[in-house]
Amino acid sequence: MKALTTLLIALLYSFICAAQKDKVYSSLEEALKNPADVFVLSLSNKKLAQLPETIIQFPNLTSLDLSGNKLTELPLSITQLTNLVELDLSDNKFNTLPEIVTRLTSLTELDFSSNNCSVLPNSLSALSRLRILYLNNNKFTQLPDAVLKLAGLSELYLYGNLLSSLPENIGKLSKLTELGLGGNMLYALPESISQLTQLRYLTLPYNLFVNFPETITRLPNLIVLDLNRNKLTAIPSTINRLTVLKELYIEGNKLSNLPESLTELSDLTTINIRENNSLKLSPALKKFIEDKKI
């Protein structure tokens, strides 16, 4: 009986600890009452122009949300948050990523969306544990070299920038499973995209593609492909190489037909072909698509 009681107490303690780690503190004053118990702190939309120095009083902090403020820089003291794995700096007033962020070498997720940024420090490559990087809604005209050195990245998002091309060495990001590039000015992709063999989600809506980049058809694990709102005039017959594709989005293009080989995509469950006003489908394609359209 004593052993059972001890086990129950241990389980209860583990449950309490786990719950504590998931608790989100949104008040700095409340968090400072028991700083060692704070693992997740959200100071979003607090109109902060500076980060309070008291931030260093949270030795166990793993997640910090500073989105929606007026920050233009960060204090050196933030580097004392050595357990930080998630940092959200989105929707602030940064012109570039503060170099001191690159000293937070435990980071696995960084959101730097919606700032006024066109360059990143080369020291970004020091974040060797980074797995997820959001750079949406900035002013990047090219993919920063420092990003290409983040060999461990699995998710990269650059929606709403000014990219007109991607570098050939993007193939170095061989662990990418998700790549979001919607809302740019892309009209072609480099051949090295085919080296991203682990890629599962590729989103390219609202770009300038007239020709379907055939290098996409050499992505063996692709399950979602979004090319909505481009200027595509044709889909190649080699689309059938995407044997595990589940979702295909080609709304709002200039397609007049689709290849019969599309019917060979046996895993396809969703296809969006709306607003291709000249599109005509063969009976076989109509039958194949009729229960998959959205």
Image (tube, rainbow, N blue to C red):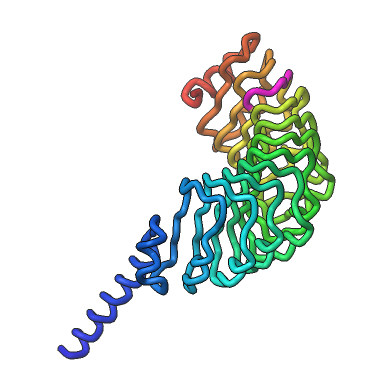
Q: Residue furthest bottom?
A: 2
State whether residue 99 is above or below residue 243: below
Q: Is residue 178 visible?
A: no
Which quadrant of the structure image shows residue 151? Answer: bottom right
Main SS category, magenta section:
loop
Q: Quadrant of the N terminus?
A: bottom left
- Tell me what residue is drawn at x 52 percent, y 44 percent: 68
- Along the line of sight, the residue nearer the viewer: 223 or 103: 103
- Tell me what residue is drawn at x 78 percent, y 29 percent: 187
- Along the line of sight, the residue nearer the viewer: 73 or 231: 73
- Tell me what residue is drawn at x 59 percent, y 66 percent: 78
Q: Is residue 117 left or right of residue 17?
A: right
Q: Is residue 232 magenta?
A: yes
State whether residue 105 is above or below residue 2: above
Q: How many numbered circles does the render carry?
A: 0
Q: Is residue 142 left or right of residue 13?
A: right
The picture places residue 67, in percent across and down from the top left corner, at: 53, 48
The picture places residue 115, in percent across and down from the top left corner, at: 64, 43
State whether residue 52 is above or below residue 135: below
The picture places residue 59, in percent across and down from the top left corner, at: 49, 74
The picture places residue 16, in percent across and down from the top left corner, at: 30, 71
Q: Is residue 176 visible?
A: yes
- Tell me what residue is drawn at x 41 percent, y 71 percent: 35
Q: Is residue 84 magenta?
A: no
Q: Residue furthest left?
A: 1
- Along the line of sight, the residue nearer the viewer: 162 or 153: 162
Q: Residue furthest top?
A: 278
Q: Which portion, as a residue range, is magenta?
A: 228-233
Which quadrant of the structure image shows residue 273? Answer: top right
Q: Is residue 1 left or right of residue 172?
A: left
Q: Is residue 125 left or right of residue 180?
A: right
